[in-house]
Image (cartoon, coloured by chain):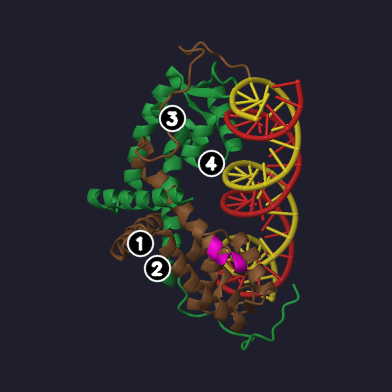
Chain colours: A brown, B green, C red, D yellow
Amino acid sequence: MAITKKSASIQQVEPDEKEPTSVVGLVLENRLGYALRRAQLAVFKHFNEAMQEHEIRPAQFSSLVVIEGYPGITQTNLAKVLDIDPPRIVSLINNLEERGLALRVRCKRDKRSHGIFLSKKGEALTGQLKELAEQSDINATQSLSEIERRQLLALLVKIYTSDTDEE
Amino acid sequence: MAITKKSASIQQVEPDEKEPTSVVGLVLENRLGYALRRAQLAVFKHFNEAMQEHEIRPAQFSSLVVIEGYPGITQTNLAKVLDIDPPRIVSLINNLEERGLALRVRCKRDKRSHGIFLSKKGEALTGQLKELAEQSDINATQSLSEIERRQLLALLVKIYTSDTDEE
DNA sequence: TCATCTAGTTAACAACTATAACTATATTCG
DNA sequence: CGAATATAGTTATAGTTGTTAACTAGATGA
């Protein structure tokens, strides 16, 4: 431990009486990064609860949706789209494949790469999950009107698309 | 491995020619949770770059700001405010204390609890960091107008305050 | 004074992310 | 052709983070 106390002007003090138990009204409320983080955690909590019975994690859901939209996409491109590292894709797809939701198909033109496809089961599940996710988003943002929700989405997309484009 | 291929209707296929390399225009763009996550990561990347030379992590910054606003706050209350688990607070405060930025003061009324205070050095640094964070938020959201930035902040705060209140 | 509760701590562990290095194929170009 | 270089996917590894369980010291209350 070895705490140097010379920088302290106080030694035995009562904790402040007016201690906060919530972050409302705090200086942190003006920090965009902090607000983003807290909102993201709140929304993800709802999402995870909704997905729990299907044992689907956020990254798995995103993968399923992208594969559905781009059947035959390669792992490399999936990694680029989702902005995650190739090694993570491997275990992700392994998991989906083991559960019979997706499958790798070796590309005959470039035998290094695999096209990824959803199985019938994967397609069916993805359809279901998208509805669950939709509802989860709404549940997590009860305090927002439909218009506000759309505004928010537009603002967020603006941020991360312009940012990833830059570098 | 042991992949069951019976659910696949295709065996040797070319990956789709029109493969995406960005997420723009994708189905995922309508997922609020996904957009939140991506935006949060983008903003945090800027934040971490800005804080790098001071070796301050997001949770450390938040702690400093809260302690500044509530000098003498107990660790338990700090944990509640930041919505993180008590064990994380310990190492967090340990670190700040070792670096001479904050200090624990045993409360004489309840000798189990500690009030946490910033040192002079901690106060000075926190002031500096707040400016850096402010600028970092702006840099990370170049594509937003000042009005949009404020809108966004308000919407985010709405989400996470109503959510944490519920439970 | 005994049982129960709380603040803080420690330690073990699970999850996620990033990095490095390896393999097999492809491509380039002398 | 064939040597050098590059790419897709994989494996292993390790850093970082968040979670849980259990412990200690002190407080509270019958």
**Callout 4 environment at 10 Å: few (<14), some (14 to 19), or many (20+)?**
few
- Are the numbered discs 2 and 4 placed on the same chain, yes or no? yes
Say which of marks 1 and 4 sits in front: 4
Could you tell me which chain the residue with mark 4 belongs to?
B
**Is B44 drawn above or below residue B74 in the view shown?**
below
Residues drawn in magenta = A49-53
In the rendered image, which quarter contains the N terminus of chain A? Answer: top right
Horizontal and vertical percent position of residue B1: 74, 72
**Pointer 2: what residue?**
B30
- What residue lies at 46% left-to-right and 57% top-to-bottom? A43
Horizontal and vertical percent position of residue B19: 47, 75
SS class, disc 1? helix
CB atoms of marks 2 and 1 within 8 Å: yes
| CA distance for labels 3 and 2 | 40 Å
**Pointer 4: what residue?**
B84
**Pointer 1: what residue?**
A153
